[in-house]
Image (spheres, rainbow, N blue to C red):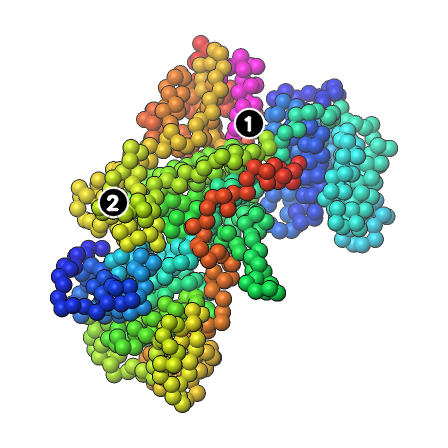
Amino acid sequence: MTIDAAPTVRVNDFAIKLANVNGTGSASANSLLMQAIFRMGIPVSGKNLFPSNIQGLPTWYEIRVNKDGHTARALEYDLMVAMNAQTYAEDIAAVRSGGYLLFDSSWPLDDDLAREDVTFLGVPLARMCLDNFTKPRERILMKNIAYAGAIVALLGIDVDLVRSLLAETFARNEALRESNQKALQLGYDFALETFDCPLPFRVEAMDATRDSILIDGNTATALGALYAGATVAGWYPITPATAVMDNFTRLCATYRRELVPGENEGDPPTVKNNYIILQAEDEIAAIGMVLGAGWSGARSFTSTSGPGISLMNELLGLAYYTEIPAVIVDVQRTGPSTGMPTRTQQADILLCAYASHGDTKHILTFPANPAECFEFAVASFDLAERFQTPVFMLLDLDIGMNDWVVPKFTWDDSFVPDRGRILNDEDLAGMKEFFRYANADAEHVAARTVPGSDSKGAYFIRGSGHDMFGRYTEDPVEYQEVVDRLKLKHAAAATHVPAPVVINRPGASIGIITIGGCDLAVREAVDELAERGLPADFMRVRGFPFVADVRAFVESHEYCFVVEQNRDGQLRSLISIETGVPIESMHSILAYGGFPLSAAQVVDGVVGHGIIEQLED
Amino acid sequence: MPSITKPLIPLAPLAKNELGLTIRDYEGAMSTLCAGCGHDSITAAITHTFWELSTPPHLIAKLSGIGCSSKTPTYFVRGAHGFNSAHGRMATIATGAAAANRELTYIGVSGDGDSLSIGIGHLAHAIRRNVNMVYVIENNGVYGLTKGQLSASADIGTRPKKGDANVVAPIDPIMLGLAMGATFLARSFSGDKEQLIPILKAAVAHNGLALIDVISPCVTFNDHEGSTKSYRFMREHEVKEVVTDFVPERDEIAVAIGGPETRSVTMHDGSVITFRSVPEGYDPTNRISVEEYIRDHQRLGEVVTGLLYLDESAPSMHQINHTPVEGLNKLPFEALCPGSAVLEDLMADFR
């Protein structure tokens, strides 16, 4: 990344960072700024780097604006909004040379903190709010909207647009609406009068987001589950997955609740919920509920994070071996153990691929953004029922909890869900006998019945050793027959999981493989590498088991890099184990400190690797 | 679990229930438990219960965890849908199954290891949720399949076959149930079918979770001197004062055996439970006095059996959640997916 110290004008290409204290109401001001830029039609991202805490600790929000859509996390900031005295020193140090720092000048800044290559912009936010607001709470909260007002002026954001956003947000609260508008104006006017606005880096309206929305992955996942027809959810609260069920609950209350008129005239209507959401006592119970419902033929799912997957392991093996559909949404966070609950990682890949004791293998999907969360959630329910097995959708905290600009979701009303092979009473009547695991189809899936079907279809589902008829067995041949089929069934899912995205470049001899939320950073890095004369082919895997293309991609490149967010190169290992390509043919580029990936980390990883010199020789 | 198919040899003409089915139609595979196991008597009582109630076998779901008790669902109602799950987790799976389809009768069979140690949290929460199911604990005080370790229900002083006497406090599922807000609590003895069958029938009719603790002696590991879960101890210390009758909804209520000391409770489905020979002052609907009564007898070394507590007014899981009567698993996709127009409107919220 080049450092540009000269004050040349840069339009729609910069990054700002806001340093706050958590629990002070800064989140709404920060997302207001991001939303305003989005509404101006400019590609933008907002990343919340927050502590595992409710009030009083440092928290940061980063906004990256990029006309070309490169909105992965930036590592250098043109403007720092330093609202947290605890972190002044590190926040001032993080401004790029030639950049700006906005601080609350109600109090003098320590001389030691000064930097000659950074322009300090003092705004007396606390004093302004003290003079203009009377309620103690307002005096604190309105500082946030006041700094947002200053930034609107400094970056050239359309102030009328921001005003209308505030009016929308506080449509039903006149007092708050007026306070916010006033605070916005205070900051805006001060900046206009005091500084040379706008700054050299600024926004100008574009038309790149007209057909896009601003949504987080957890909400998108809940929407996917709603559209997929999920009716039963069992869950246990955990960061960063909780919002999946919060949203599913909210959506179900709106779209799945009916009021049935009373039987007699004058009787009050009764509520009929076409769903049930059970907050379980732990994640073991959550997955148990999902399996009970899946066994019964309802589309059911849970959402959790790594610690929850650890607890679910026992019953995931039961589901695999007894062949019960289930969808498990894993919003990955930083492990191991409690780890860093509010930081992102992709370190549950192997855990999910082989969850539970004994020989197990699961189907995984890897969305890269909220649009794919919506799409893959629907696909995951189809996969689970088609292959009668647990399906994991692995997103991560960055995708799940941050707002992303993605294309509007659409729905095809002719969609028919794939419910898999289920025998009804009519089917059973035409059969001489029913055996649960017999007569598997070409994809090694046997037909199932659900409880309540005719007694001819009744059987005893069991996690203990069973033969192809579903009967208890301790016989080696009968046992192997079943587990061997399960292996083939898993392999057959390869062509049904979302296909990898491959983007080839002319003259590329290296390949870069990545997964999930690394997508944007790696694509940006690939562009930059090409500019540096190092063209690379790109592949993002989106599902497991791997389709043949994954192996072919690795084999068709002299050397591959695998970019992922965990310490041990889990995707690289999984590709090697499952496709047979030598692990040495792939080099890991890893970022696992808990923050979203940046293109610079990928570029540095590729450029700094010895193999590049060898290839060039 | 290993099991042996029962030969279906018709003997004398057997009586038929309302569905035209005989008791043999409600049996399952041959038991592979030890000869004389209390669990087999419970299996027989469950078999009779469903036959007498004329419950269509395919509308029964029988679930279990892991352990000797959890093998027994194979031994009753072969035409029912069965789920032998994982140790201690039966309640969670039953909860999900019941949630998805409220048309079935769910019966979970568990043991004291399954329910009072590894799965006690799930039992407690299934009680709280008032899951629509019958929950039978076949309680013998030991882990049979792993050869006789004492369980959490073993009384202080109980001697295992090998090793020292138990010194830690036992967990009583009835007391647990009272604390967790249970709506149906009964205790019985596997050797007493006359008492157990009416209790099971009432449990099936109950609107919510019906917990039945059945003392069921383990003939191999816990039927010796010094065990409070032995046949001999139970015969000598059982206090069968809370006698119960069950009259299904379809029968004339008038046939209920009444008397000056009789109390009746009408169940959710219209059937009636009658308590007879109840000691003066015993009120099966008063949580506090029930607890006191059981404790007083426990202090005397006595085990009170019968339908001990009943609250038919509390809402069940389905009532709490307003689930559709036809069952969530039967809703057509069209009733679940809001469609493209709604999605298009929704997208405006994310601008």
* Crowd tier of the residue under label 1, counting other residues whose Cα lies within 10 Å: few below 14, some 14–19, many 20 or above: many
Which residue in the rendered view is the most extreme toward the top? Answer: A617
- Residue at 44 percent of width and 39 percent of height: A417
Give the magenta part as a residue range. A518-536
Q: Where is A488 relative to B32, above or below?
A: above
Label 1 sits on residue = A521
- Quarter of the image with the N terminus of chain A is top right
Q: Position of residue B7 (x, y in %)?
A: 14, 59
Question: Is A402 situated left or right of B70 in this image?
Answer: right
Q: Mark 2 or mark 1, which is nearer to you?
A: 2
Can residue A191 be seen here?
A: yes
Decide whether the magenta segment is chiefly helix, strand or loop.
helix
Question: Is A522 situated left or right of A141 in this image?
Answer: left
Three-letter residue code for mark 2: Met
- Residue at 75 percent of width and 46 percent of height: A171
- Residue at 47 percent of width and 61 percent of height: B317
Label 2 sits on residue = A431
Q: Position of residue A340 (x, y in %)?
A: 52, 44
- Residue at 61 percent of width and 43 percent of height: A50
* Crowd tier of the residue under label 2, counting other residues whose Cα lies within 10 Å: few below 14, some 14–19, many 20 or above: few
Question: Is B231 situated left or right of A156 in this image?
Answer: left
Tags 2 and 1 touching, CB below 8 Å? no
- Quarter of the image with the C terminus of chain A is top left
**Residue A535 drawn in magenta:** yes
Which residue in the rendered view is the most extreme toward the front? Answer: A265
Instruction: Kindly indicate whether the residues beneath marks 2 and 1 are on one polypeptide chain.
Output: yes
